[in-house]
Image: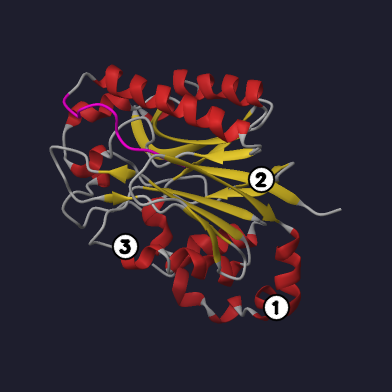
Amino acid sequence: MPRITRAALIQASLCERTDAPLDKIKQAMIDKHLALVAEAADGGARICCFQELFYGPYFCAEQDARWYDLAEPMDGPTVRLFQDVARESELMLIVPIAELATDEGGAIYNAAAVISHTGEYLGKYRKHHLPHCHPGFWEKFYFKHGTGGYPVFDTPFGRIGVYLCYDRHFPEGARELGLNGAEIVFNPSATVAGLSEYLWKLEQPAHAVANQYFVGAINRVGREEPWDIGEFYGMSYFCDPRGQIFAQASREHDEVLITDLDLDQIAEVRKVWQFYRDRRPETYGRIARV
């Protein structure tokens, strides 16, 4: 029997000014995503992924302690809300938030909750690679480097991994996800035109080819004042284990991109390209050397 997973990506623009009260910003973005999740469910999706730091602007465009207050624990109100939504819609959700680690003295992680279609919290991924090298991408001011490795979640819709935005520039973690058995890797992002747009359709298809899994790449849309670090250019997409982009969203508009992933393609590709058989980890010592 074919293994077909109908999956969705949500790209969205900010719907409040960045100088509005934080609770107003957050609630407006949550409300927007509730409507978009309903659209994904109505379209028959079984798994849906949001964009990076979905419930606010990409606030790392500036260094201001005000934004610390957007963080909340993984068992906080946002994840609990979307657990209820997942249960009611029978839709698996990947929900990226600023995670407040209450057991670590209030450290904050750029992270994503993984929620099953039954509403069960399956776990999280914490972003390992944090940019702090370009004007407007000051993540180390807010976040601690991720812990917990590169987990893969075994679900009825495939084995799911998460990589977050700047992570995609590092092939090592992408390979770790493949070695851990990932069949679909979601990469929620916030990336702007003129900086790394030329890499948007290069790196992630390359990861898909090298590691022989599907990739769902998500980017937000629009400009976020007053920083205006550039245009978040959308163009969220899915690519297959051959590195072919076969579904893509628009550049400028809020959109729910829904498509079918034929997971049987993974085995077909691996019978042709035996990358896991032919790799030589004993020769790669320098890669992981500090």
Pair 1/2: label in front = 2
Q: Is residue 266 left or right of residue 8?
A: right
Q: Position of residue 128 (x, y in %)?
A: 41, 51
The tag on residue 82 is none
Q: Label 2 vs label 3: CA separation?
A: 27 Å
Instruction: Determine the residue positioned at 37% across, 30% down.
Output: 55
User: Any magenta on residue 12?
Assistant: yes
Crowd around label 2: few <14 · some 14–19 · many ≥20 (10 Å): some
Q: Specify the segment rendered in magenta.
A: 10-19
Instruction: Determine the residue positioned at 81% across, 54% down.
Output: 2
Crowd around label 1: few <14 · some 14–19 · many ≥20 (10 Å): few
Residue under circle 1? 274
Residue under circle 3? 197
Query: As displayed, is residue 121 above or below residue 195?
Result: above
Residue type of the residue flagged with mark 1: Gln
The tag on residue 6 is 2
Which residue is nearer to you in this view: 218 or 98? 218
